[in-house]
Amino acid sequence: MDSIEQLRKVLSKLPIGNIKSKTKEYPSIYSLLVECWDLLDIDGDLATHKLTRIENLTHAGADILTFEIERHGPTVLGSVYGLIHQWTVDLANRKAICDPYKKRLLYEKSKSLNVEPLAQNVFNDIISGKKHPLCQCE
């Protein structure tokens, strides 16, 4: 019996719903999910070692597990948001599918800069013929 079948067997004994990390079944479900991850046909990009960050693990029905995982790719490019990917694992069909994501605010946003008064100041100086320190045109 491979890890997918073992996970199906464990899930068959559980009620449908969220699987809290403090429950006695969680460690075995998590371990089996990690073991079987590379056996699944994965529609999306999620390396096995990133499963350590799963949230909201849920038994969603016959042979279906769902979970969310926060991805930090946008933060590398300066975003204050992380992406939350929703995964559905269909053990019967040996597939894992990444559904559309939502955003989560990770850091406080900086206040927006209102550039209108600054631009108006430069514009007024140009129109009136004054030299403005930000303008280097003659």
Image: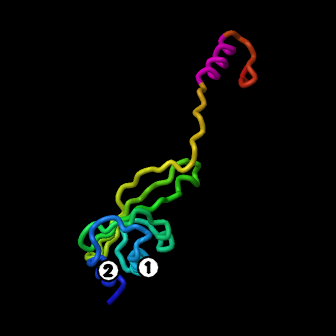
**Label 2 belongs to which residue?**
10
Magenta run includes residue 126: yes
Q: Is residue 74 above or below residue 66?
A: above
Q: Residue at x 66, y 17 (%)?
A: 121
Q: Residue at x 69, y 14 (%)?
A: 125
Give the Cα separation between the discs numbered 2 and 1: 12 Å
Q: Horizontal placement of 8 versus 67: left or right?
A: left
Mark 2 residue element = helix
Q: Horizontal placement of 113 versus 136: left or right?
A: left
- Residue 114: x %, y % from top left: 59, 27
**Label 1 belongs to which residue?**
31
Report the magenta residues as a range: 116-127
Q: Residue at x 34, y 74 (%)?
A: 41
Q: Nearer the viewer, residue 66 or 112?
A: 66
Q: Is residue 132 above or below residue 17?
A: above
Magenta run includes residue 109: no
Quarter of the image with the N terminus in it: bottom left
